[in-house]
């Protein structure tokens, strides 16, 4: 016992509390929190009532005038402001859908507001807008419709009591286009938007700050587990804030005291200093605005969405030093540069500061299922060259959050384009299996790897809620290796990206983590590249990230391999055309010094083609007007391309002296010799065209050739077509027997029918244009043909036409042809279909049951082959009930196989021994008329003894690249020899895919990047079958004086110098490797 005075015993009862106290009813005190900030019945009594200190909207202080351009025009600032404006006021409605209205606004801040801390102008018409200064500088975007971005902070210069003018360009669409109710239904043309708000307000910034404090602490009370002290404390803090506000009758003092109470839980969150604590973050937040280049709106609107969104971000960066914003798609930057030069300069200065961060390295955020190999290369080449030329740097991270599945060759291609990192997230949309990884190493067909991260929050348009931060760890699937995640936040598609409110919320989340804990610690201020650099460091230090081999197949949106067939047809034809243009123009530029390699024209075509490969364009998930725009663009591209081909051909003097009866010649633009029977243009005659690479001969048949094709009607409606290789029996339009004569092998199982047209009911769960759902398979119906008749009787080619009625409004006319066999060339049965298609929610396919057994089928993909199951053993196998192929799909067993070739299709399925090529769909949303009309489709059956090999690869290419026939009398030798001056010999698995001029050659460069001395030819080769292959690039030195050969990457940076002697460069490629070489002249 201590000393001191002895205590006098108290006579009163010992008490801790003077009154009965019950335990709070947790649920009621939690539910109560909603009262404090909601807009409901208590809004005149709660914090909402304190948000504004004053307001003015009368005509004297807010004077509105409008100019409404006719015909849905979108005039520039200069055009629009040169017109007369008429008086208008809030309450008026503006429309129709897609129209533009320019408002001239004269603001006069009333005296009683002039001294207030923060003045804002609020504008809400439920649609999008852009604020312009009086002299034509875009300042900031606006997005109405409730919660998004309706405020513009008035400059201090407006406080002088005088009238100040600015403009608002209103676009009559909301952030998701113009659909009403159901997002994806075709937009009605007559939507109107009421101008609901055009007010000057004085903002109570402390009330606004308390609102966000309370929101985040309230979330902690709602979302932390009830068995945590952090949850209980959050609830107590929130109730204390409310009680203080009530006790103070909502006074400013009670608001300030509320903020003080909040600081007990979240600390001081009023500046970016909140991020300066040394503690290790788990969640790296990055601002983003996903702007679909087309989707529920056309390109013309996208261009304005970019200006609205990016100007917002520049403004936010001025106010929030921690803010970092990342944005992909070179095309969008290029549009900004051309259409909004002042804003572009502002963006450029932010890029320099490091706050606005270009990413992705591709031209657009493109689909990766459908574009061909060279298209993928060019997405990177054009994208990276743009970023490098404008911002002095290439991108290091490939950014593709929203694409419908990811090609198995992407890791190789993006690595070869300087990007070893990949960000995505779309696989979280799988509706069958959950993708098991968040951070992993993704392995290409050739073994190349990229470090891949999928935002664990499963979105790229997060609103930076407490829950987004929390899910960035709770949904993380790779925490055995790493416990960090990227949080990608900001409204997309016209929502304008991150808002100040989102940045305020994140500050509070961080404050909460540091002061109280339990919430993953979020950090702002880094870049996506910083994030990946940390992961790479871990990998270097021995962390073994989980691996995923092959394609990242999206278990959804399988209809996009088929929807909007015309668009896909155009893409395929453009890819072929560009291949030919570059090959011929390269040769022409080396032969003829007067001929200028048409770099700009080629670039323009490529950029247009790449643009149409955007991830909602080529897949077929955009609205109708987008496809009308594409049709126009493709028409322009084909016209320009046709001229380039002509130009190159005439520079090669191929048709210099040609007359109508000059000799027929042909060019084979493919890198191997080939021979085919072809119809002579403008004649009924056939000819054997053979030769190449390069020039080929055309021999018209005089009399009967050695080999013939024949056709006979065996009995009514039953025909037999035959040549040296095959006997094909066709009954009722379907192939009931296909015999390989030399192998003595029947390919059609007994009683089954190949080339059978089938139709399915096609009503997916929701996303019509995107999806075909697994149950459509249960509705299969065979189409019965009406009649078949012989069209061509031989001897060089026989053909049989079958007419099939689909319904009262749709029909198919299919011509089955068999040409006489050509020595040394594989023979195939070709089908050419003409379709009139007017169906509703139906899916047309054609079937090929074959007597082949294998648990895997093969499908061509870019520069390679994907193998996929033909069975439904597991849900992962079953999910691939419809897959993507390029020019061919193949089912082979030991000793024999069948390939199905096509000229413009991408959807395929192989179940058991049944192969099915998808032809046409008929979705009614978002394009109400998708695929309605006339179609031409070619496909073929290519049976082959032995395994799947180069015969399929080459024949499928031949099928897509017809010989170019022309009339010419004397072809200069130099031209002829130049055309085949570069040859690839050795393993037939090697494909010489592309020949082009070096991007930066002195005579080619457009000056955007430093030039290289001299002239060069770039050749791209890939290994097509999946094994190590050796070959030789052989150059005819007499016509092509190559000095040296270097291996380069896709961006044409020099790599290893190759041994090059006597015109020969020996090469060895690993399985499915894509290798590019520069031949320096
Ligand atoms: Zn998208």
Image (spheres, rainbow, N blue to C red):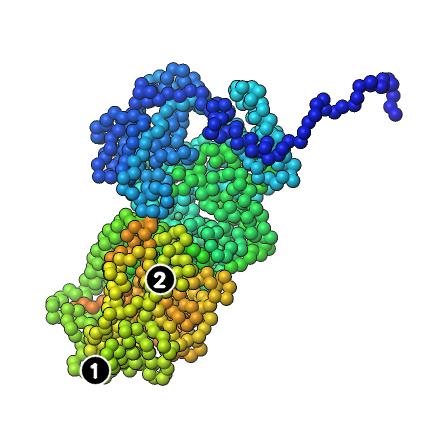
Quarter of image, res 649: bottom left
Q: Label 1 neighbourhood size at 10 Å, few (<14), some (14-19), many (20+)?
A: few
Quarter of image, res 187: top left
Residue 513 drawn at (x, y percent):
59, 37
Q: Which residue is mark 1?
A: 705
Image quadrant holding the N terminus, namely top right
Residue name at image x 46 percent, y 68 percent: 871
Q: Is residue 155 visible?
A: no
In the foreground, 496 or 1032: 496
Answer with left or right where residue 244 lies relative to residue 303.
Answer: right
Say which element carries label 1: loop
In the foreground, 693 or 555: 555
Image quadrant holding the C terminus, namely bottom left
Residue name at image x 24 percent, y 39 percent: 72
Residue 636 drawn at (x, y percent):
23, 53
Whether residue 268 is situated above or below residue 178 in the rendered picture: above
Compute the Cα span from label 1 to label 2.
44 Å
Residue name at image x 50 percent, y 33 percent: 504
Quarter of image, res 994: bottom left
Answer with left or right where residue 268 lies relative to residue 829.
Answer: right
In the foreground, 691 or 101: 101
Residue 325 drawn at (x, y percent):
44, 40
Give the numbered dot on residue 176. Answer: none
Residue 620 drawn at (x, y percent):
34, 53
Residue name at image x 47 percent, y 50 percent: 425
Which tag, 1 or 2, sits closer to the chain's start? 1
In the foreground, 322 or 830: 830
Say which element carries label 2: strand
Q: Which residue is mark 2?
A: 760
């Amino acid at each position: 016992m201590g000393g001191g005075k002895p205590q006098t015993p108290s006579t009163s009862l010992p008490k801790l509390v003077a009154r009965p106290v019950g335990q709070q009813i947790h649920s009621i005190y939690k539910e109560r929190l909603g009262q404090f900030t909601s807009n409901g019945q208590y809004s005149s009594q709660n914090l909402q009532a304190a948000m504004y200190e004053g307001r003015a909207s009368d005509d004297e202080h807010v004077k509105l005038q409008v100019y409404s351009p006719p015909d849905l025009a979108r005039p520039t600032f200069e055009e629009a402001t040169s017109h007369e404006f008429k008086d208008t006021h809030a309450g008026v409605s503006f429309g129709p859908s897609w129209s533009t209205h320019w408002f001239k606004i004269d603001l006069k801040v009333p005296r009683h507001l002039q001294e207030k801390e923060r003045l804002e102008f609020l504008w809400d018409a439920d649609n999008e807008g852009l604020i312009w200064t009086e002299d034509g500088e875009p300042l900031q975007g606006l997005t109405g419709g409730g919660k998004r971005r309706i405020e513009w902070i008035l400059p201090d210069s407006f406080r002088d009591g005088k009238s100040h003018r600015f403009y608002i360009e209103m676009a009559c669409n909301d952030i998701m286009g113009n659909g009403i109710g159901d997002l994806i239904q075709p937009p009605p043309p007559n939507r109107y938007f009421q101008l609901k708000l055009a007010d000057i307000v004085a903002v109570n910034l402390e009330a606004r700050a308390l609102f966000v404090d309370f929101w985040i602490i309230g979330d902690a009370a709602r979302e932390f587990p009830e068995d945590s002290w952090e949850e209980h404390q959050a609830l107590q803090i929130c109730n204390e804030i409310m009680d203080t506000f009530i006790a103070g009758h909502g006074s400013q003092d009670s608001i300030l005291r509320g903020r003080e109470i909040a600081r007990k839980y979240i600390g001081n969150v009023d500046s970016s200093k909140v991020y300066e604590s040394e503690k290790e973050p788990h969640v790296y937040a990055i601002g983003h605005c996903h702007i679909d280049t087309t989707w529920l709106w056309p390109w013309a609107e996208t261009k304005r969405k970019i200006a609205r969104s990016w100007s917002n971000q520049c403004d936010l960066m001025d106010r929030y030093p921690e803010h970092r914003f990342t944005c992909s798609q070179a095309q969008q930057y290029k549009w900004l540069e051309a259409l909004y030069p002042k804003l572009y300069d502002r963006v450029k200065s932010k890029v320099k500061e490091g706050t606005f961060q270009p990413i992705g390295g591709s031209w657009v955020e493109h689909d990766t299922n459908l574009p061909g190999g060279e298209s993928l290369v060019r997405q990177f080449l054009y994208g990276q060259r743009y970023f490098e030329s404008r911002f002095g740097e290439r991108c290091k991270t490939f950014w593709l959050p929203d694409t419908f599945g990811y090609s198995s060759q992407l890791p190789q291609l993006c690595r070869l384009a300087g990007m070893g990192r990949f960000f995505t997230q779309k696989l979280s949309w799988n509706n069958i299996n959950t993708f098991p990884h968040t951070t992993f190493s993704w392995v290409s067909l050739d073994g190349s790897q990229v470090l891949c991260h999928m935002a664990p929050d499963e979105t790229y348009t997060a609103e930076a809620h407490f829950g987004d931060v929390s899910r960035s760890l709770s949904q993380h699937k790779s925490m055995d290796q790493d416990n960090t995640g990227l949080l990608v936040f900001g409204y997309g598609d016209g929502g304008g990206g991150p808002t100040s409110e989102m940045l305020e919320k994140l500050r509070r989340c961080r404050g909460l983590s540091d002061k109280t804990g339990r919430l993953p610690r979020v950090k702002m201020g880094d870049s996506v590249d910083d994030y990946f650099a940390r992961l790479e460091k871990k990998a270097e230090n021995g962390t073994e990230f989980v691996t995923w081999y092959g394609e990242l197949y999206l278990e959804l949106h399988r209809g996009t391999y088929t929807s909007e067939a015309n668009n896909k047809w155009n893409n395929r034809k453009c890819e072929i055309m560009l291949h030919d243009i570059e090959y011929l123009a390269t040769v022409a530029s080396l032969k003829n010094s007067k001929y200028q390699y048409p770099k700009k024209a080629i670039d323009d075509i490529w950029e247009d083609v790449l643009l149409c490969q955007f991830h909602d364009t080529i897949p077929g998930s955009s609205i109708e007007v987008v496809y009308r725009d594409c049709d126009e663009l493709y028409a322009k591209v084909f016209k320009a391309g046709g001229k380039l081909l002509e130009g190159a051909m005439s520079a090669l003097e191929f048709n210099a002296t040609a007359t109508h009866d000059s000799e027929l010649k042909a060019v084979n633009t493919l890198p191997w010799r080939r021979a085919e029977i072809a119809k002579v243009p403008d004649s009924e005659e056939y000819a054997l065209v053979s030769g190449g690479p390069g020039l080929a001969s055309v021999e018209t048949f005089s009399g009967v050739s050695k080999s013939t094709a024949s056709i006979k009607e065996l009995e009514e409606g039953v025909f037999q077509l035959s040549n040296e290789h095959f006997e094909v029996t066709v009954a009722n339009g379907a192939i009931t027997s296909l015999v390989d004569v030399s192998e003595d092998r029947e390919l059609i199982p007994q009683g089954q029918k190949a080339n059978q047209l089938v139709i399915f009911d096609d009503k997916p769960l929701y996303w019509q244009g995107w999806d075909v759902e697994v149950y459509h398979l249960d509705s299969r119906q065979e189409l019965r043909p009406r009649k078949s008749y012989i069209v061509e009787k031989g001897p060089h080619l026989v053909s049989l036409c079958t007419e099939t009625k689909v319904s009262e409004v749709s029909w198919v006319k299919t011509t089955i042809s068999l040409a006489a066999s050509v020595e040394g060339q594989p023979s195939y049965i070709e089908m050419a279909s003409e379709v009139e298609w007017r169906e509703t929610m139906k899916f047309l396919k054609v079937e090929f049951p074959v007597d082949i057994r294998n648990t895997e089928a093969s499908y061509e993909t870019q520069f390679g082959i994907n193998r996929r199951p033909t069975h439904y053993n597991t849900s992962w196998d079953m999910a691939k009930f419809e897959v993507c192929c390029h020019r061919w799909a193949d089912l082979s067993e030991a000793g024999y196989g069948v390939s199905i070739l096509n000229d413009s299709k991408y959807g395929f399925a192989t179940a058991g021994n049944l192969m099915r090529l998808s032809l046409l769909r008929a979705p009614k949303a978002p394009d109400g008329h998708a695929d309605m009309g006339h179609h031409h489709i070619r496909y073929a059956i290519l049976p082959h003894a032995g395994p799947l090999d180069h015969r399929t690869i080459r024949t499928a290419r031949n099928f897509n690249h017809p010989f170019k026939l022309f009339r010419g009398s004397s072809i200069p030798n130099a031209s002829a020899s130049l055309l085949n001056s570069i040859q690839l010999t050795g393993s037939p698995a090697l494909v010489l895919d592309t020949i082009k001029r070096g991007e930066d050659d002195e005579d080619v460069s457009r000056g955007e990047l430093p030039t290289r001395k001299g002239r060069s030819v770039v050749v791209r080769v890939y290994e097509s079958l999946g094994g190590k292959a050796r070959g030789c690039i052989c150059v005819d030195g007499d016509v092509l004086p190559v000095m040296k050969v270097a291996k380069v990457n896709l961006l044409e940076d020099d790599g290893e110098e190759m041994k090059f002697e006597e015109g020969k460069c020996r090469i060895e490629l690993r399985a499915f490797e894509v290798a590019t070489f520069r031949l320096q002249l």
